[in-house]
Amino acid sequence: MSKTVMPYHLGCTVWSLPEWKGIFFTDDAKPDRFLNQYASVFNAVEGNTTFYNVPEESVIKKWGEQTPKGFKFCFKFPRDITHEKRMHNVKGDVLDFVRLFEPIREKVGPFMIQFPDSFSANELYRLEEVFSILPKAFSYSVEVRHKDFFDHGKHERNLISLLKSYDVDRVIFDTRKLHSTKSDEVSIIEAQKKKPKVPVRFDTTASRPVLRYMGTNDILNNEPYLKEWAIIVAEWIGEGLHPYVFIHAPNKADQPKLCQHFHKLLSELIEVPVLNEWPVNKQDTQLGLF
């Protein structure tokens, strides 16, 4: 990243994708260099890995060492907490999990607490119980998918009030383009089966709004939505907020180009530092010197 401080965080859903070799990573990139090369361009990443497995402390420290100052991991709470135990009697589990990241505290963005679509307003009190004991050294965001929380009524108001009272951000997951697309691409069809189809909310509840956007694999078809979000993100930044933007693609190999394009659209609206060149392009430049 440029020496100028980036007013928002931008990244993909993964940092270790072998398919990026020769496209985003250098041709000869080894897995133990993937994170370092990824973090030379983008300053954030979704930490989906912790949703499935809780890493060892030594692994966490290594992640911290491989990333520059200002880089942020947005780790997901384990599914055991959010999906299996559904936030019931999990205070000990939550504290054990969050404290694992103390050694790299400055590299941790908002933890993402993602619920299944079956987690309803009737269980909201469990979330408040956990909020009350969360270490304030970290920040948090919540993604809900149940229709209760999109009712423009008391359930949604209760959620928003709870999030605001604990300074927790509401994750916005925009899949409008994905679900309105008719395609025979396998990656898009699979994504349509797996990703939620929920209404989009543009309001914020705390100072670090989290946007997860998923459309198609190409720039052209995503353009209207990415332009819309560039305008909103620019407004958030203008209001003194610090957004986190994660651009998904049904085919993960296409994520870097979509992230880069979003940043270009944002740079046309407000002043932001230029993203560093991709590792593969630096490699080509170096080869041309010999």
Image (cartoon, grey):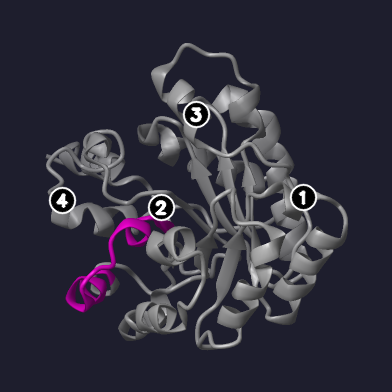
Q: Is residue 211 above or below residue 26?
A: below
Q: Is residue 159 left or right of residue 35?
A: right
CA gap, disc 2 to disc 1? 39 Å
Q: Which of marks 2 and 1 is nearer the N terminus?
A: 1
Tell me the amino acid under the disc marked 1. Phe
Where the C terminus falls, by quadrant? Answer: top left
Q: Is residue 85 above or below residue 32?
A: below
Q: Give the distance between the C-alpha atoms of the residues marked 3 and 4, in whole angstroms.
A: 30 Å
Residue pointed to by mark 2? 276
Q: Residue at x 34, y 80 (%)?
A: 104
Amino acid marked by disc 4:
Pro
In the image, taking residue 19 as reference, residue 92 lies left or right, namely right
Where residue 250 sits, quadrant-wise, is: top left
Q: How far apart are marks 4 and 2 (CA)?
A: 21 Å
The quadrant of the rendering that contains the N terminus is: bottom left
Ranked by sequence position, the earlier of labels 3 and 4 is: 4
Q: Marks 2 and 4: in contact by CB < 8 Å?
A: no
* Alpha carbon distance from label 2 to label 3: 35 Å
Q: Where is residue 204 in the image (x, y as percent from the top left)?
A: 75, 63
Amino acid type indicated by mark 3:
Lys
Secondary structure under tag 1 reads: helix
Label 4 to label 1: alpha-carbon separation: 41 Å
Residue 132 picture quarter: bottom right
Is disc 4 in contact with disc 1, using a CB cutoff of under 8 Å? no
Q: Where is residue 154 in the image (x, y as percent from the top left)?
A: 86, 61
Q: Work out whether residue 61 can be spotted.
A: yes
Alpha-carbon span between mark 1 and mark 3 = 21 Å
Q: What residue type is labelled 2?
A: Asn
Q: What stretch is highlighted in magenta?
A: 45-63
Q: Which residue is drawn at 53% across and 84% down?
A: 134
